[in-house]
Amino acid sequence: MLVVVVTNAPPRLRGRLAAWLVEIRAGVYVGNYSRRTREMIWEQVLLGLGPLGDAVMVWRVPNDQGYEFRTAGQNRRMPVDFDGLKLVSFRPEEGKGGIY
């Protein structure tokens, strides 16, 4: 299983994703492809995302978590490796200091 979620993506990228995946909700695409095709789709996301968009791709793998993911673009959520587990950390909001 492969899931791609995009926000603020240009229409051209959304159309390209719809050619390979099924859009089950606005900006949420699912499919089932090989590693090679998954990497090609991610390259298309990186090329077409634009300066304001962001994206995440999640797919199933045989590890402790059962999945792997990648992110691109501007988002407060960022992946962090924690003893071999991939977790999500939050950047502070701009203009606000401190730890959340």
Image (tube, rainbow, N blue to C red):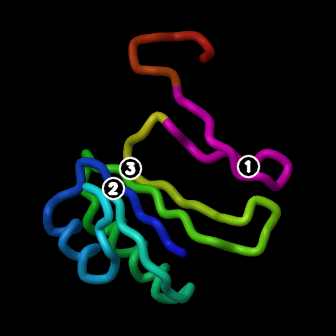
For label 2, the SS is: strand
Q: Mark 2 or mark 1, which is nearer to you? A: 2
Q: Which mark is residue 6?
A: 2
Residue 84: within the magenta? yes
* Pointer 3 residue: 73
Q: Residue 17, percent across and down?
A: 28, 73
Describe residue 83's horizontal placement relative to residue 53 as left or right.
right
Span of residues in magenta:
77-91
Q: Which mark is residue 81?
A: 1
Residue 11: within the magenta? no
- Residue positioned 30% across, 57% down in the render: 25
- Residue positioned 54% across, 63% down in the render: 58
Q: Is residue 2 above or below residue 85?
A: below
- Residue positioned 26% across, 49% down in the render: 51
Q: Quadrant of residue 43?
A: bottom left
Instruction: Say which quadrant the C terminus sits in.
Output: top right
Q: Residue 76, percent across and down?
A: 46, 34
Q: Residue 98, percent across and down?
A: 58, 10
Instruction: Say which quadrant the N terminus sits in.
Output: bottom right
Question: Local crowd at mark 2 within 10 Å, few (<14), some, or many (≥20)?
Answer: many
Question: Local crowd at mark 1 within 10 Å, few (<14), some, or many (≥20)?
Answer: few
Describe residue 66's horizontal placement relative to residue 54 as left or right.
right
Q: Earlier in the sequence, mark 2 or mark 1?
A: 2
